[in-house]
Image (cartoon, rainbow, N blue to C red):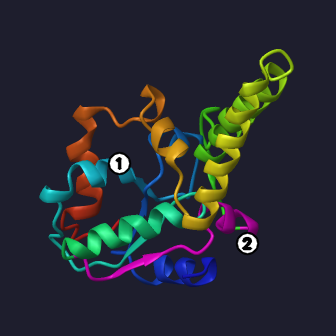
Amino acid sequence: MDTGRVRELLDSDPRARLIDVRTPGEFEAERIPGSHNVPLDLLRERRSSISPAHTDPVVLVCGSGARAEQARDLLEDNGFQRLTVLSGGVGGWQEQGAPVERGTGKWAMERQVRLVAGSIVLAGVLGSLRYPKLKLLAGFIGGGLTFSALTNTCGMARLLSLLPYNRTPAQDAPGLLAALTADNAAGR
């Protein structure tokens, strides 16, 4: 669903929920006002215990749309019916001039991946001047990035999401999931 239609839905239906499935670090850095953070990794981890207590419309958001699509597949399997994905994610939202809230200086996952992948490639190329086989490391990362683009998945992002600043503290999990699953008769 494009930004304009999502904004119309949020304006017209007070029960509509905007669920951001990015990591807590990404959410802290930048988010759509009124959105709730329920990270994709938490959804995967708690898959067996997630079920809706409502029929409210839910708009899933991430950085570009890929993780939100994965979340939609998972949630549809758990009985959620009125799910949609924000086309283009937070980036697309911003490009359309829609408001965002900015928080701490944590980096978005895409930026983290670019830093790590670029650093490994640079180290591999520079190191290959002394140890020629290190250029294979750069080739391996290039292959991984190509695979990532073709499959719209990212193994490096999955690994980076395990870092402490990208993780959801265990004590927060029930509260975060409630933003998605609980009945909210009063609306947002």
Q: Which residue is mark 1?
A: 41
How many C-alpha atoms fall within 10 Å of the one at disc 1: few (<14), some, or many (≥20)?
Answer: some
For label 1, the SS is helix
Whole-percent x and y of residue 150?
61, 66
Q: Quadrant of the C terminus?
A: bottom left
Relative to the observer, which residue lies in front, 106 or 103? 106
Q: Quadrant of the N terminus?
A: bottom right
> For the residues carrying marks 1 and 2, which lies nearer the camera in this image?
1
Q: Which residue is mark 2?
A: 96
Can you see residue 43? yes
Q: Decide whether residue 170 is among the magenta residues.
A: no
Disc 2 residue type (three-letter):
Gln
Q: Residue furthest right?
A: 129
Disc 1 residue type (three-letter):
Asp
User: Which residue is at a point 53% across and 78% down the rendered structure image?
Assistant: 6
User: Which residue is at a point 61% across and 44% down the rendered structure image?
Assistant: 108
User: Which residue is at a point 24% across and 48% down the rendered structure image?
Assistant: 45
Asked if residue 45 is positioned above or below residue 52 in the image, the reply reads above
Magenta residues, start to end: 80-97
Whole-percent x and y of residue 87?
59, 75
Identify the image quadrant of residue 80: bottom left
Whole-percent x and y of residue 104?
60, 33
Can you see residue 38? no
For label 2, the SS is loop
